Amino acid sequence: MSKKVFVGMSGGVDSSVTAALLKEQGYDVTGVYMKNWTKDLPGLVCPWKQDYQDAKRVAVQLNIPFKVYDFQKEYKQQVVDYMLNEYQKGRTPNPDIMCNQEIKFKLFLNTAVADGADLIATGHYARTHGGKLFVAKNKDKDQTYFLYRVDSVALKKTLMPIGEFGSKSEVRVLATKYHLVTADKKDSQGICFVGKVGIKDFLTFELGQQPKGEIIDQNGFVIGEHDGAIFYTLGQRHGLDIGGGLPYYVTGKNIKRNEIFVTTDLQDEALWKHEVNLADIHWISGVAPKTNKDLRIRLRYRLPLIEIEDLTHASKDNWRVLLTEDVRAITPGQSAVIYDGDQVLGGGVVI
């Protein structure tokens, strides 16, 4: 008897091809659309209805059952509210990572299994084997940075066939071969629920207008006014609206006093660090690596991997990572993901 696989179908080409491939491989496939966010924003209609319809059309084309799981309440609490709370504390979070941890590979997995599934599948560019996570063959599209908080138990019950393809064009060729209506659909951009709306606009919509505050340069002089410290992140250059010729870069901020600090010196020590401290650490296997040898770290999505000189369990909740080179704008709230070759070991949140 073939295994039952519930495929998370977002209405995009990757998850559409995932469903088609698994059906072709003999699995008993059911498509599931996760209804996470349906709220319209000023000037922009949330595209969830189009995505839902595209997912359903593909399920009809493939002649597979189709379900809708309504996770809006949990998504708002565990992803959106988390993001808003982090920004209010002065950090720069990554809600897509939280979405994977709490919604796709916990809530969706548990709901699907309770609903009769043996496995789940997603259209992520990543590979799983024996409860371990590996980078996708398509390094340009690799999404393991967003998946490091998934545990090995969930990974053992997850299929990610798209991770085996070397290019996006191969995926689209297959979508055309299967005559899928999503074959030419453009990839979605931006944060999962913000989409085309700028993060500043989204935060203003959810949290209201913020009080203006002082911009202070590297010499301690007040040189301008900002729209609210929560909107700015380390290393940011655009959106400061400071005249005077040389560009300014954000080096820090004081949330309580609503101040941001800037510099015109790109080599300013406040911008560069070769040490990073991590909290809320998560190891996929549940066990920390026994050696630092050959480990590398990614400090932002698409940032090149950097060699780790030393990885130390500094205290109960914190880890200290010494890098082999200085890195610009290591940002509190962002995730740092640790790799051993192509395998993802885990990571933590920059503090």
Image (spheres, rainbow, N blue to C red):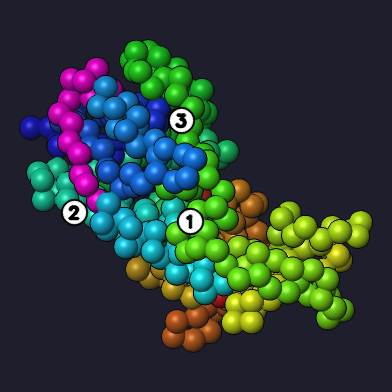
Q: Amino acid at mark 2?
A: Asn
Q: Read off the residue under disc 2.
A: 110
Whole-number angstrom distance, CA of label 1 to CA of label 3: 39 Å
Question: Which residue is at a point 31% across and 55% down the rendered structure image?
Answer: 75
User: Relative to residue 328, is residue 125 drawn left or right?
Assistant: left
The quadrant of the picture occupied by the N terminus is top left
Question: Which residue position holds label 3?
Answer: 165
**Residue density around tag 3, few if under 14, some if 14–19, many if 20 or more, within 10 Å:** some
Q: Closest to the observer: 268 or 327? A: 268
Mark 3 vs mark 2, CA separation in Å: 28 Å
What x and y, as percent, mark residue 270? 76, 74
Residue at 27 percent across and 58 percent down: it is: 74
Q: Secondary structure at mark 3?
A: loop
Residue 64 in the magenta stretch? The answer is: yes
Q: Secondary structure at mark 1?
A: helix
Question: Which residue is label 1 attached to?
Answer: 205
Q: Residue 29 vs residue 279: left or right?
A: left
For residue 97, what is the image quadrant?
bottom left
